[in-house]
Image: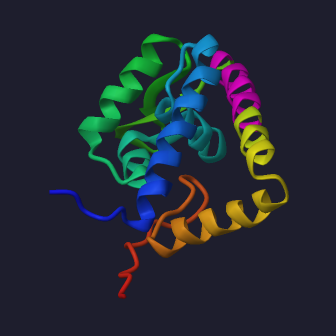
């Protein structure tokens, strides 16, 4: 049985294609998009506990642990005992992590430019609408705001 395409399908497909483009841009850095976002958040947050980082991304501590273990093994972050609470560990970017973050920002700029190339003068409106969607569904930029519950969208 075939159903009519829903309006949001184009958005989902576009998001998949944009993420694939981002993966291509990040490939020379040997980093995945979600790892890049974690490093970016850590760059804003400074020393941060793994549980606080997980909360910012809306994932379990176990999921964040898997990601941070990979970043630790690659030498992009360190884990140390929190001087304020010996029972807690904090994560922090290394010099290598800060250097990688500069490359990540360049890759993101390239993807922004690719979108602008496709959309032309509509790009600014698109980016504004994308932020409104994120905010309307309760999203935040990890490390910039308090965590908030998703907004209930009613039709």
Above/below status of 97 relative to 65: above
* Rendered position, 85 above or below 101: below
Q: Tell me: 138 left or right of 42.
A: left
Q: Residue at x 69, y 60 (%)?
A: 127
Q: How many marks?
A: 0
Q: Residue at x 38, y 73 (%)?
A: 150
Q: Horizontal and vertical percent for residue 14?
A: 53, 47
Q: Is residue 91 left or right of residue 106?
A: left
Q: Is residue 149 above or below residue 11?
A: below
Q: Which residue is pictured at 32% across the width and 31% down the height?
A: 65
What x and y, as percent, mark residue 67? 38, 28
Indicate how the structure is coloured in the image.
Answer: rainbow
Image-quadrant location for residue 86: top left
Report the magenta residues as a range. Answer: 96-109
Q: Is residue 102 left or right of residue 67?
A: right
Does residue 151 belong to the magenta stretch? no
**Residue that lies at the very extreme toward the right in this rendered image:** 121
Outermost bottom residue: 155
Which quarter shows the N terminus?
Answer: bottom left
In the displayed orientation, state which residue is furthest to the left: 1
Query: From the image, which quarter does the C terminus lie in?
Result: bottom left
């Amino acid at each position: 049985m075939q159903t009519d395409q829903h309006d949001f399908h184009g958005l989902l497909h576009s998001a998949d294609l944009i993420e694939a483009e981002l993966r291509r841009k990040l490939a020379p850095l040997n980093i995945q998009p979600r790892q890049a976002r974690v490093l970016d958040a850590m760059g804003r947050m400074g020393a941060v506990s793994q549980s606080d980082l997980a909360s910012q991304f809306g994932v379990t501590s176990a999921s964040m642990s898997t990601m941070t273990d990979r970043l630790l093994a690659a030498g992009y972050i360190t884990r140390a005992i929190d001087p304020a609470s010996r029972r807690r560990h904090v994560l922090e970017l290394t010099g290598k992590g800060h250097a990688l973050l500069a490359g990540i920002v360049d890759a993101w700029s390239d993807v922004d430019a690719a979108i602008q190339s496709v959309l032309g003068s509509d790009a600014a409106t698109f980016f504004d609408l994308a932020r409104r969607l994120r905010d309307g569904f309760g999203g935040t930029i990890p490390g910039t705001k308090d965590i908030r519950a998703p907004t209930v969208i009613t039709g």
